[in-house]
Amino acid sequence: MIYDREYFMSANFSVVFDSDGQTRIMDCKSGERMHPLLEPFAEAKKLYLEQSLVAIKRLTDIGTSPVVIWDVGLGAGANAMAFISYDWSTICDERLALNLVSFDITLEPLTLAFNHQSAFPYTSHPAVESILTNKHSRTWSCNQRAQKYHIEWRYVEGDFCQTWRESAQSKRFLLTPNVICFDPFSQPVMPSLWSPELIDNICDAFKETPVLLITYSISTAIRALFLSNGWYVAKGKSIGRRPECTLAVSPAGNAIGLLPSSSSSSAALLDKNWLAKFLRSDRPFPLELGSFAQEKRRSIVLQHQQFS
Ligand SMILES: C[S@@+](CC[C@H](N)C(=O)[O-])C[C@H]1O[C@@H](n2cnc3c(N)ncnc32)[C@H](O)[C@@H]1O
């Protein structure tokens, strides 16, 4: 089959046909793919949706309503649609209310995926059309009696760091999150989204809120940032060729059991083996932290309750 190259590209993104047989959206500048490990929707479900189910059920059971999910890096919408299309009646009763907030600087990749529904069939859902076409209010909600639960989806356009700063200044967060699907491109491509400043701010702002943050990154330096802020860090499931991923949970979230239990999944708090690796690492923290700050954080990590 001959593909019209232009048709499969927008200004900054392209549909690519990878050698593993999967069709993905690629960032043209960096060459980085969205969901590079599995078929994109399968990866979204396994990495972000499935690993948050215990937390969402737990939060709903203790009366949290709505449960707020931040989708950092909407991209082609696979993560968002994994939450929207899930059959919630299998784990929650009619009390479930979900509020999904997606952040991105552009709707370009979602538009590209929507224009190629044969490759990205999850975009054929009315929610995607609603977000793309409803220019004045990028929202979608569903409150069908048959489904019993309520879901709202909202898109917030702009640099996430800037949105964060503005919210922090006004001390009004766009709905305090309970689950954060943290899915920016990698640190070299998007350094500001992996910066100590942003991660420290998130950890500090939500330490007393029950929050589970899920990310594909397994960087020692990123995990150490969460630990040095007093958050608990577990390794999550193996996804494709990647042996694990990262689940970080706020102290308040750890206290009420937001992590999937180790018997029902591979999630387990990082242990002394990880600590030994951290102590051997030649880059235990992001380089922008000076040696004094690193030393201070190192002792916090060593004394963290999760290693006692
Ligand atoms: C790895 S992709 C996300 C894939 C997506 N979660 C999905 O399910 O398809 C990363 C996304 O982050 C977005 N992005 C880049 N810089 C950003 C920023 N400063 N703030 C928010 N989003 C940003 C990109 O436009 C891109 O869509």
Image (cartoon, rainbow, N blue to C red):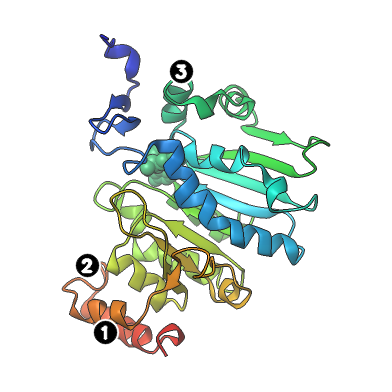
Q: Residues within 10 Å of mark 1 (few under 14, many from 20)?
A: few
| Vertical position of residue 48 compared to residue 125: above or below | below
Q: Quadrant of residue 147?
A: top right
Sequence order check, earlier mark of 1 and 3? 3
Residue kind at label 3, given as amino acid type? Asn
Q: Residues within 10 Å of mark 3 (few under 14, many from 20)?
A: some
Query: Left or right: where does residue 248 sit relative to residue 279?
Result: right
Front residue (pair 277, 8): 277
Residue in the image at 29% along x and 26% along y? 16
Residue in the image at 46% along x and 87% along y? 305
Front residue (pair 193, 42): 42
Residue kind at label 1, given as amino acid type? Glu
Residue at the spot of label 2: 287
Tell me whether the residue at label 3 lies in contact with that at label 2, contact meaning CB atoms closer than 8 angstroms.
no
Residue at the spot of label 3: 115
Tell me whether the residue at label 1 lies in contact with that at label 3, contact meaning CB atoms closer than 8 angstroms.
no
Sequence order check, earlier mark of 2 and 1? 2
- Say which quadrant the C terminus sits in: bottom left
Q: Secondary structure at mark 1?
A: helix
Percent across and percent down for residue 177 are 60, 58
| Mark 2–mark 1 distance (CA, rounded to whole Å) | 13 Å
Q: Quadrant of residue 244?
A: bottom left
- Frontmost of labels 1 and 3 is 3
Residue kind at label 2, given as amino acid type? Leu
- Regarding residue 266, the answer to whether it shows in the image is yes
Residue in the image at 47% along x and 20% along y? 117
